[in-house]
Amino acid sequence: MSFQAYIDNIKAKTGKSPEDFKKLAEKKGFFKKGALVDTVKAGQIVAWLKEDFDLGHGHAMAIYATFKGKTE
């Protein structure tokens, strides 16, 4: 599955774009001033996305990748 397919499937399932998830992550304290907080680990974000949005591991990692700057 392509990276874009992961993003499209996440949007279809949750109604949220990567930018929407970034805004929610800011509210959770994972971001400060538009940057991922150094002490935040991928596992924390994956756990949050799995628990709150019922995403699978691969889909949660795709969102984490967008947080790290991946776009395709």
Image: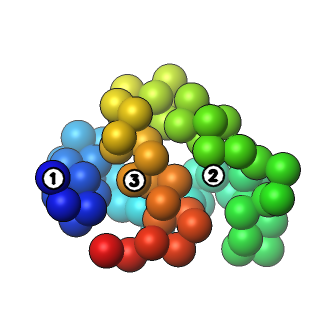
Label 2, residues with CA under 10 Å away: few <14, some 14-19, many ≥20:
some
Amino acid of disc 3? Ala
Rendered image: mark on residue 22: none
The residue that appears at 18% across and 60% down in the rendered structure is: 2
Q: Measured along the vertical axis of the image, is residue 57 above or below residue 6?
A: above
- Marks 1,3: beta carbons within 8 A: no
Question: On the image, numbered disc 1 is attached to which residue?
Answer: 1
Question: Which residue in the protein does label 2 denote?
Answer: 25
Element at label 3: helix
Tell me where residue 50 appears, x and y as whole percent: 46, 29
Write down the quadrant of residue 63 in the picture: bottom left
Q: Report x, y in % for residue 45.
A: 60, 41
Viewer-closest of 34 and 43: 43
What is the quadrant of the C terminus in the image?
bottom left
Residue 62's mark? 3
> Nearer the N terminus, badge 2 or badge 1?
1
Tell whether label 1 touches label 2 (CB within 8 Å). no
